[in-house]
Each structure stands twice: as structure tokens, then as C-alpha cells.
Amino acid sequence: MAKKLIMITESYSTSQVYEQWLYEFFGQEIEVEAYSVERDRIDRTLPSADLYLVAATSSAAFRRVVSCIPAGGQVVISTITFRRREIEELKALPTGTRALLVNLSIQMAIETVAELNRLDITHIELIPYYPGAVCPPDVQLAITPGEVQFVPPQVKRVIDLGHRVFTADTLTNIALKLGFRWFLKSGRYRRHVASLEDQGHSLVTLWNDSLRAENYLDILMGALSMGILGVDVEQEVFAANSVAEEMLHLRRGSAVGSPLAAVSLELYRSLEGEDLRQECSKLIQLDGVYINLSTVPASWEGEAMGFFIILQRFTEEEERQHQFRRQLYDRGYKSKYVFDDILGHSPAMLQAKTIAQRMAGTDASILLTGESGTGKELFAHSIHNASPRRKMPFVAINCAALPESLLESELFGYNEGAFTGAKKGGKMGLFELAHRGTLFLDEIEGMSRPLQAKLLRVLQEREVMRVGGDRIIAIDVRIIAATNEDILERVRAGTFRKDLYYRLNTLPIEIPPLRDRGEDLFLIMDGMMRRLGATFTLSPQARAAFRAYTWDGNVRELGNIVEYLHLTGKQVIEAQDLPQYMLAVPGQARLEPAAQEEGSQAFLRAAAGREEAFRFVLGALAQASGGMGRGQLCLLAQQHGIPLTDQQARGILASLHQLGLASVSRGRGGSRITQKGSALWRELQI
């Protein structure tokens, strides 16, 4: 319903102008009833109204007009001023110019002169003129605020400033007393205040500054896709955007000024017991819909001012995160290879590729097992590119390359302040980055048992929590893990969780070593040469050496040798051009000079101070029916009461390998005793 405003002006023409302005400002929100001292008899109580605007302050009838306002009625005594453009015209007049200031009465003429002087129009001599006054004969310029009809006929030049307009104070008071706070945020109000020559330096200026900040806040809140509620220390809502009103089924504007409990009892109860001086985050239900609720404290110079509530539908939060991840995908989190990039026609490789292609279409976890350099990462990229997730991120990390604490923060992310050196704002973890895509965990055996437990929970619950955080983040990630060790041996040794092993080993794929792919050796080599631009050829003797070599470093080692041969600059590679270790006797390809010494003396020298452990490892290999991994060795040593750590076992096996007593494989074949090692073991038993 429109608010009624009764306005009393000095002249009828002024009342018409002011009435038009009021409708332009407030539109259909008001009903204006205009009176003028000039035409209307104002000597009895005026009709009832929501507001009385008295604009006849210069009239002799002012006191009588005010006395006719009903007791208890709201009153605004208007003040008027000039627009900037009219004052600029007067400032352009030459100093010393004499001009009549023409207005309706002597009081109004004098008041207008005073107003212009206050606005720094002091370089002109202004002579008050009104009906009945005498016009000085030498004055040829008249200035008037819209009262041109009273200008003496002998004055030929007239500057009509137009009717003076309402000051910012007057409009602000009208809006506040009628309950039109919305008007003070409107473009009409801002444009009017900006057009005034004098915008005031009083409380209204502070009010307008506050409104400007409030407008910026409203613009920001309106631009957000999440619901925002501002709550003061008295638990009363002071701000609410349209998204929050829609989520809480509130009428537009009804939340502001109401207690939080009245706005939403469910929301109020969900925050009971929380320390709202600190940030908090939780998942709640409103009308059966899951909502991410967060609170952010608000303070000014250390004093609590309340807090903001941030509401976001769970599905919307997921979609927002997804869009962010899509941007990261566009920046490089994508797979680079496809199955056609995996060269080879050997039965072992064709079988591995066929299994991998078949498994790519599922979402189950995959465990790639193979020696170092066999191309496990190439398979991971190709599986992702052949899966329904191909357009989503592919994120890779080497679990053995980072210390435990750093690996945890990389995988799960962290909140601001989670630890010394944590980035401002926190960091998204790789699980979040890989949402709806694939996360490749290389050298999974390098992950500590505490991290294994966390990874298992992620695989089971499909959700993560950042380091230092308390918010659960749902994720949809396909895991591809890779190892160059026998994980099952590590399970038996107790260094790898059995439950995690079976979770990861849902779809196992064995990547064959290069020595088992004789047919592929030169095919792969040709591809490497094309990429390098190499044109050399191998002599028959060099080709024979390539076939005889065991390729412990697999495809990676082959790539290094091809690059080495390319850099020699020779067109035909002879056997003597190959690295010397490739020409050694098979099974002793990496022997150092120490291996040429008498077996028992070299063994005892290497085992000095650790003879018991060395003898045990050599004996265990001699008695084994096949290869043995470090995990098996450590477990067996523990059963015999011999202290042996995984690191110690690694060092002993390396020494035995250097002496030619054992062959060490990084794959599932484990370590085996050599013919020379068996002979030494028999010698030591005598």
C-alpha cells in the first residue's frame, strides 16, 4: 500500500515541480497531496498522512502551517540547494558583475543570496529583488531560481537557475521516515546526490558512505551462487542474499531484522554449541537437502561483530569443484599416451595390453607390477585415455620420492595454518584435483603404513579430509597403483597392509621385462631412433650382444644406450662400441674387479663385522627353490633370531651381486644365488 505524503510549499508552481520530483523518486510507493500558501487556505488541521513535508520555510505563514499538522505526525522540514551545473555557470561570470537575485519574496530572495554565498558565489554582487522592489537602473543581469515571471522587463539578460532541489539530508529523512531504506541504495538517489553542488559534510555524508559500503556488500552477495546470512552478536540477521532466502523459503527482505531462530529454527539449532568466534564447517540437512554450512566470524578492531553463515547445496559445491578441476585439466593435468604408443608384438606384451584395454572400461582399482623401466606409467596413461574418464584429470605422483609428511599433504591437501609454512588459503590435494578422473600412485610400496591406512579409508569411503581440516570432501577417483617389487612379499613381511593390497589388486596387470620380449627389442629401438633422429645401424656382432644382454633396466636402459650410441656419431656400431658392461659374461654383467678375487676371501672382506647376516642371506638363497625377495629374507631372519632390516637386506644383496654371488632382480623374480655363489656356500659349509 502506498504511503501518503502531504507537502506544503510557498507557491503553487513550486508545489507542482516538487510533486513531480517526489513521484520520480519514489514512484507508486507514495501518494502525494500538495498544498501551497499561495492558493490554499491553511488554517485548520491537515488530513492524516504518513509524513508531512514542509517546504514553505521562508513564508510568513510558516508557524501557522506547522501548527496545522496533527499531533504526533511525522514531519520533515525541507532544505533546498542548487545543482552543480547551475553553480558552474555562475562561477564563469566575471568578478565584480552586478546582478539581481529575483525570487518570490524578500525573505526568499535574501535566503537565496545567502545560499549562493555559502556555495562560494562571492565574486558577484547579488542584489535581492522581489515583487514590489525597486530595480537599480544600471543592472542588466538577473539571476533567478525558477521565478522568471518576476524579473523586471528592463533587464534583458536572465540566468534561470531553475527551482532549487532537495538536499541529500531532506531526501534521506523522507526515505527513512517512510521506511524506504531501499531508496537510499537506488541509482536515483545516488545520481541525485552526485548532481548537487553541496553534498554536505554532516551525518548524512557518513550515512551515504555507509550505504555505499552496504551497496557493495549487497552487490557482492548477489553475485555469489551460495546463500549468505549476516548475523550480529544479538543473533539478529542483518544481511541476507536472495540465494539464502530461496534456500530457506523466505519472502524477499523478510530475514533482515529478524532473530536467526525465527528465520530458520533448523539453522539455529545446527549452530548450537559451536564457538562462532571461530570458523566452523559441517554438513546439515534442510528440508531433506544436504547443505554445506560454514561460518566465518566478523570483527572490527578486535571486537566481535557477529558472523556470516555460508550455505551451499552439496551438489552445487561438487559441481563448483568439478569446474575448477576442469580448469586444472586444461592447464596440463591430462594423460599423454595411448595404447598405440606401447610398442611390441611379443606374446607377453600383447597379453598385457589386451588385459589393460579390457580393464580400462571399469572403475575398479588397478595394480601394475613390473620391474623398473618396463613402462608402467605408459600403461597408466593409456588405461586412463581408454576409459570413460578420459576427458577428466590424470594426476600422477611417485610415493617413494617424498617424505611421509609431504606426501600426505600432497595427496590430501591442507588447510591454512595446518603446519609451519602452509600456504595462505590452504592447498587442494591430488585426490581433489583428480576428482572424476584418475590418480596414478607410482612406487606404492614406498608409502608408510599410516598413509596406507588413510589411503584404504579413501578407497572404502570415497571421501577425504584435508590436513588440519574438519570438512569431509566427497571424491570420485579411479586409482591406478604401480610397484616394481613383490607387494605380496611385503604383506608377508608386515610392511604393507594386506587389506590395502587386496583393495588395490582388484585388477592386477603384469608388465613383462624387456628380456622376456626378445621380439620387441629392435622394434622398440627403431622407435627410439626415429624420435632422436638417429641413423646408425648395428653390426651382426653388436646385434648379438643386444640379444644376449639381460636388460635389468628394461626399456629405460635401452633408451639410455640408444642415446649414447647416437652421440658417438658412428654410422655402424660394432660390438666394441657398446658399453663394456654389455659385453660381460651373462649372469655377471655388472661385476666389479672384486668379483675376480678368490670367492671366500672377497666374501669375508665384504662381510667384515656382519658375517652372520651375510652367511644367513647367502644360505637362504642357496636353499631357496626360486627367487627370494627382501621381505621374505627379513621374515626368515626374524624366525631364526637374526636381526635384519629391509635396508640391511638391500645392502647385503647388493654386495653379493657385486661379488657375482647373487643375481638381483627388482621385479617379482626376487634375488637368486648364482653358480659361483652356490660353490662358495658349499665351500663355507666344509
Image (cartoon, grey):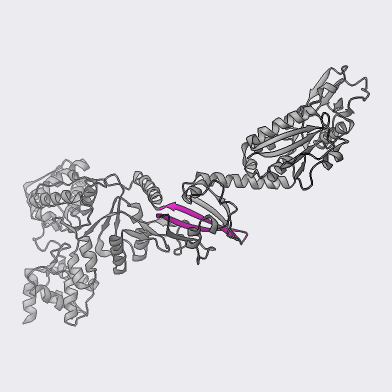
Q: Position of residue 291 (x, y in %)?
A: 42, 55
Left or right relative to 180: residue 552: left
Q: Is residue 640 visible?
A: yes
Q: Is residue 569 above or below residue 28?
A: below
Observer-nearest residue: 253 or 464?
253
Q: Nearer the viewer, residue 316 or 47?
A: 47
The residue that appears at 44% across and 63% down in the rendered structure is 418
Of residue 518 and residue 606, the one placed in the foreground of this image is 518
Q: Magenta part mainly helix, strand or loop? A: strand
Above or below — where is 361 with respect to 27? below
Residue 293, magenta (yes or no): yes
Which span of residues is magenta-colored? Answer: 287-313
Between 516 and 530, the one nearer to me in the picture = 516
Q: Is residue 234 left or right of residue 244?
A: right
Q: Position of residue 278 (x, y in %)?
A: 52, 63
- Image quadrant of residue 31? top right
